Image (cartoon, rainbow, N blue to C red):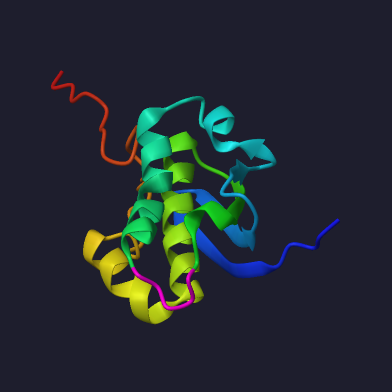
Amino acid sequence: MKKKTILAQAVGRRKEAVAQIQLISGTGLIFINKKPAQLYLQNSSHSIFSIQAPFEIFKNIENPNNYKIESIDTIVKVKGGGLVGQAEAIQLATARAMTMLDNSSFKKPLKKKGYLTQDSRVKERRKYGLIKARKAPQYNKR
């Protein structure tokens, strides 16, 4: 059995989700927590598109190392959050890993599309005296 070489590793975060990704030499498959991506994301078209978006840029760029999308497997470990947050964390991790493959040719188009920008929004904490973060109990005059 041929040993697969790790080409790049990266981490992406979104809300409570954390995705660790490895790009390895292979046949162009995406596995999330040891399951195929379609199965793990429950055929959610938005989530599947957001994961594959950095690879679309990858196809359109001439790279000096001649990496081909069909020859790279994506292995993802993700935990925390919901499916949409996990998909966005995977998208960020994928974009970061691709810049590690070849920084000079991938970084500029990925940055232009916004795939390298981490979305720092998180759930606001609950304050005392309130029901949720901002929802207050109904005012009672008498």
Q: Quadrant of residue 71?
A: bottom right
Task: Say which residue appears at 49% left-offset and 76% top-offset.
Answer: 65
Q: Which quadrant: the N terminus?
A: bottom right
In this view of the protein, which residue sits in the foreground, 76 or 102? 102
Q: Would residue 79 be seen by someone viewing this image from the given angle?
A: yes
Task: Say which residue appears at 48% left-offset and 71% top-offset.
Answer: 66
x, y percentage for residue 5? 71, 67
Q: Would residue 125 be seen by someone viewing this image from the given angle?
A: no
**Left-right relation of 48 to 17:** left
**Left-right relation of 62 to 31:** left
x, y percentage for residue 123? 37, 46
Q: Does 17 lie within the magenta span?
A: no
Residue situated furthest right in the rendering: 1
**Left-right relation of 55 to 36:** left
x, y percentage for residue 113? 24, 59
Q: Which quadrant: the C terminus?
A: top left
Task: Say which residue appears at 42% left-offset and 78% top-offset.
Answer: 64
In this view of the protein, which residue sits in the foreground, 61 or 120? 61
Residue situated furthest top in the rendering: 142
Q: Does 64 lie within the magenta span?
A: yes
Up/down of 123 relative to 132, above or below? below
Is the magenta region chiefly helix, strand or loop?
loop
x, y percentage for residue 93? 48, 60
Residue situated furthest bottom in the rendering: 104
Up/down of 95 relative to 83, above or below? below
Extent of the magenta region: 62-66
Up/down of 5 relative to 70, above or below? below
* Number of numbered callouts drawn: 0
Task: Say which residue appears at 42% left-offset and 52% top-offset.
Answer: 91
In this view of the protein, which residue sits in the foreground, 98 or 131? 98
Up/down of 128 relative to 142, above or below? below
